[in-house]
Amino acid sequence: MAKDHTGYHIPKGFSATGLIYRSIRYYFRNSIKGVTINMARFGDTYSAIFPGNRLVIVTRDAGFVNYVLRENHTNYHKSEFTSDKAARLFGNGLLFSNGDYWLRQRRLIQPGFHSKRLQGLYDIVAGTVDEYLTTFPTGDNVDIYPLVHQLAFEIAIRSLFNVELPPGMMVELSTLFHGLQEFFVKEVNRPLRKLTYPLTGADRLAKRRSENLRGLIRDIIRRRRIDPGTYNDLLDMLLSARYEDTGLPMDEDPIIDEVLVLLFAGHETTANTLSWMLGLIASQPSVLKKLQEEVEGIDANGSIRNEYINAVINESMRLRPAAWMTDRVALKDDRYGPYSYPKGTIILSFFYGLHRHKDHWEDGEAFRPERFLDENGKMKKPTAYFPFGAGPRMCIGNNFAMAEMSIFVQAFFRKFSIAPTGQVPVLMPLMTLRPDKVILKVMGRGA
């Protein structure tokens, strides 16, 4: 390989020249398919030299993934490839920060996401879901993706700000945020797009959207600071948090950063998982029937503890992980197994491939929620499973996300039944794993 990488035992893979041809397929068609084809050629771990002589290692080896994310996590940061781009638009929140600042923020915010502290949010989620489902359409060809996407955004907003926002403000928040998010996704997945910015002005528009969005959130925060009421929402948690070393609260801008991260990470991943899940359930009448039986006689809190509902959600995240890949950059030279590699190497953990690997999953392409249950019907935890990442940077909102999806399942399947239409959702592996659309037959229960 390249001169700078001699002396290391780097996995087989592509040289910079070889990658040029492959990158067309990798970036602009279906990157999951591209990585899978590469692994069929080179094995579970392979390498590539990117422009600038940057070494990238892609792996679906469970041990390697665990080593990078857990066992030797102190030697790895989020790579600047995505984090710096995101921080420019969304701020330096937990998802995008690194080092001592990230650790300080994580320690500050983590207690607010303990399962007991989240109990107060579950009523907000349940109320939002119930209200939204009263106008959920039925019919023979309903694209449920945009509907679930909007619901997840409303849950995120109400969980953050448990007040009635003026309708105009809710629309403006949604418009600004989704416009900014789409710009970011395109910038990451189409790097050459930035060459058109001087002509299109897309970069300037994104910056204005970011400033306007931060202004709206800043106004909400300032009004909350002088409000004597208690709202038991995530903003209350952020405002009341105190650094353990100083006893001081967060300043205004870091609070805005964390609010934007919670919006960015919370609603998109949940919307994608729920949409994929409904499509998978519709294709399995036995799973649908079992779910309809399970949701009878339980309330929202009961759904959070229901083993089968949790198994269905976990199996959906196994087959369609919203975070289908994650990146880390080595801070020092390192080695794993037969491989050694230099400081600055980017390690890409390919969760989508690992979640199907024949060494860990029997009939890995099949949708079988029972694989997450033991002989007594209790949840079990597979080792080669990373739906929320792993280690200290594991998704801070994983408990809330699981509860939110459980509450949705209980409310939705008490009210509706679904059936497939023959449409097969197309994988869109962007920053998260989206479907292009999920078209189902939606029927009211008892109709």
Image (cartoon, rainbow, N blue to C red):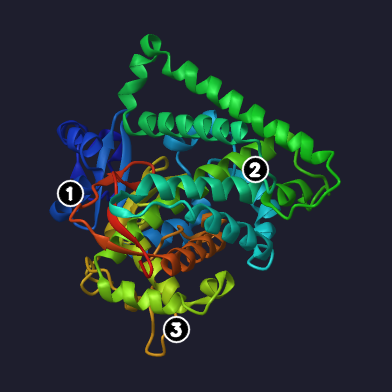
Identify residue type, mark 2: Tyr
Q: Which percent across, then down, holds residue 125?
A: 58, 58
Q: Which percent across, then down, holds residue 183?
A: 42, 28
Please say whether residue 380 is visible from this viewpoint.
no
Mark closest to the chain's N terminus, 2 or 3: 2
Tell me where residue 14 sits by quadrant.
Answer: top left
Q: Which percent across, then down, holds residue 175?
A: 50, 31
Q: Which percent across, then down, holds residue 97?
A: 57, 41
Q: 269 and 169: which one is in front?
A: 169
Q: Which residue is mark 2?
A: 101
Is residue 11 left or right of 90 when viewed as pictured? left
Mark closest to the chain's N terminus, 1 or 3: 1
Between the C-alphas of marks 1 and 3, the distance is 37 Å
Tell me where residue 444 sits by quadrant.
Answer: bottom left
Q: 213 and 59: which one is in front?
A: 213
Q: Secondary structure at mark 1?
A: helix
Seen in the picture, residue 91 relative to 277 is either above or below; the reply is above
Say if mark 1 contacts mark 3, CB within 8 Å: no
Q: Which residue is mark 1?
A: 38
Between the C-alphas of marks 2 and 3, the distance is 39 Å
Between the C-alphas of marks 1 and 2, the distance is 37 Å
Q: 250 and 204: which one is in front?
A: 204
Numbered disc in front, either 1 or 3: 3
Identify residue type, mark 3: Lys
Q: Residue 378, labelled with which disc?
A: 3
Is residue 113 left or right of 424 when viewed as pictured? right
Numbered disc in front, either 2 or 3: 3
Q: Secondary structure at mark 3?
A: loop
Identify residue type, mark 1: Asn
- Point 38% across, 85% down: residue: 374
Please say whether residue 134 is visible from this viewpoint.
yes
Mark 1 Cα shell of 10 Å, populated few (<14), some (14-19), many (≥20): many
